[in-house]
Amino acid sequence: MLRIEQINFRNHLKLAEFFRTIGNEPWFHPHPFNDLEAWRIAALDKRQDVYLLGTLNDTPVVYGILRGWDEGWELPSLGIAVSKQFRGLGIGRMMMEVLHVC
């Protein structure tokens, strides 16, 4: 079962693991994909932006964000990245549905 959670200090190491698996995708680069950025996202306090991680059996498989509110934008940018080996299974669509209600 897919589990989707907000990024925090309990799961930021899983986010860092996910960042290492996707590398530098040419079509999705909202920020650096490295350990430091995973920690920075977990450390964000009192944010409006949404950063989510989805796992299957404790394996990180999808990352979703709504960001821009913290910078004062009325409407956020949306981004979703799915691990290559899990594409085509509807995981991105599930993340989109969760982001839609955030």
Image (tube, grey):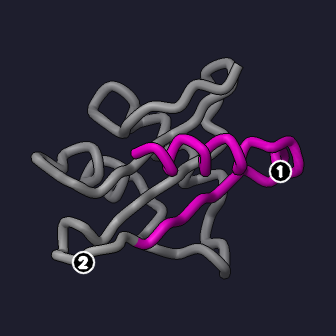
From the image, state whether disc 1 or disc 2 is nearer to you.
2
Say which of 89 and 43 sits in front: 89
Q: Residue at x 60, y 45 (%)?
A: 97
> Residue 52, how many percent across, how many down?
45, 43
Q: Which residue is tagged 2?
A: 73
Query: Callout 2: 10 Å neighbours few (<14), some, many (20+)?
Result: few
Q: Mark 1 or 2 closer to N-term?
A: 2
Q: Quadrant of the N terminus?
A: top right
Say which of 65 and 20 sits in front: 65
> Residue 85, how many percent across, how many down?
84, 46
Q: Which residue is tagged 1?
A: 87
Q: Residue at x 33, y 25 (%)?
A: 10
Is 101 left, or right, of 56 in this rendering?
Answer: left
Q: Residue furthest left?
A: 46
Say which of 78 and 62 sits in front: 78
Quarter residue 61 falls in: top right
**Above or below, 9 relative to 90:** above
> Which amino acid does the dot numbered 1 rest on?
Arg
Quick check: is 42 in the magenta stretch?
Answer: no
- Residue 101, labelled with which disc? none
Say which of 96 and 12 sits in front: 96
Marks 1,2: beta carbons within 8 A: no
Magenta region, residue range:
77-102
Quick check: is 90 in the magenta stretch?
Answer: yes
> Residue 73, how many percent across, how many down?
24, 77
Quarter residue 11 falls in: top left
Quarter residue 76 falls in: bottom left
**Above or below, 71 relative to 63:** below
> Residue 98, how many percent across, how many down?
53, 41
Q: Residue at x 34, y 58 (%)?
A: 37
